Image: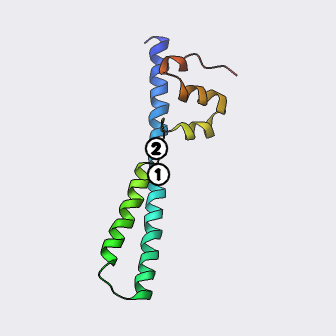
């Protein structure tokens, strides 16, 4: 295995781990937001009484939250996580340049 292959393997593993981390964080935040929305809707339903619009309203609110969670990703998923792990000047260049440019990251 050449040095280039080892670098590609390492960067692939880092990217995969960061994508998993970002995905789990998104799922956790979306799940929490949905739970809070359900609790608010349940409290509103208890205060206002039964009505025919509650199932539709609940479905729409949960669908909007789910779509919002799916659109949370940016141009390069995991770059925000990279910025918290490594110095910004290193990962900014890694996230904005094509893959071959990553091989020549600054050593500082």
Residue 85 coordinates in the image, percent (x, y): 61, 37
Report the residue at 54% width, 21% height from top: 102
Q: Is residue 6 above or below residue 92?
A: above
Answer whether labels 2 and 1 touch (C-beta < 8 Å).
yes
Residue 40 coordinates in the image, percent (x, y): 46, 75
Q: Earlier in the sequence, mark 2 or mark 1?
A: 1
The outermost residue toward the top is 2
Report the residue at 49% width, 38% height from top: 18
Q: Residues within 10 Å of mark 2 (few under 14, many from 20)?
A: some
Drawn side of residue 11 relative to residue 82, left or right: left
- Select label 2 or label 1 by which is in front: 2
Residue on which the image places disc 1: 26
Q: Residues within 10 Å of mark 1 (few under 14, many from 20)?
A: some
Report the residue at 34% width, 77% height from top: 54
Look at the numbered disc 2 and give the secondary structure of its residue: loop
Look at the numbered disc 1 and give the secondary structure of its residue: helix
52 and 77: which one is in front?
52
Report the residue at 51% width, 38% height from top: 78
Q: Is residue 106 above or below residue 52?
A: above
* Mark 2 vs mark 1, CA separation in Å: 9 Å
Q: How many marks?
A: 2
Q: Quadrant of the N terminus?
A: top left
Residue on which the image places disc 2: 73
Q: Dividing the picture into quarters, in which one does residue 50 lie?
A: bottom left
Q: Quadrant of the C terminus?
A: top right
Q: Dividing the picture into quarters, in which one does residue 16 lie?
A: top left
Residue 31 coordinates in the image, percent (x, y): 43, 61
């Amino acid at each position: 295995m050449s040095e280039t292959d080892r670098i590609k393997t390492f960067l692939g593993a880092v990217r995969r781990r960061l994508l998993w981390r970002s995905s789990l964080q998104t799922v956790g935040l979306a799940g929490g937001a949905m739970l809070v929305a359900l609790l608010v809707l349940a409290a509103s339903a208890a205060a206002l009484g039964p009505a025919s619009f509650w199932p539709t309203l609940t479905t729409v609110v949960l669908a909007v939250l789910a779509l919002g969670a799916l659109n949370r990703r940016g141009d390069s998923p995991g770059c925000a996580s990279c910025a918290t792990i490594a110095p910004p000047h290193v990962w900014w260049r890694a996230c904005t340049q094509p893959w071959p440019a990553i091989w020549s990251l600054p050593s500082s």
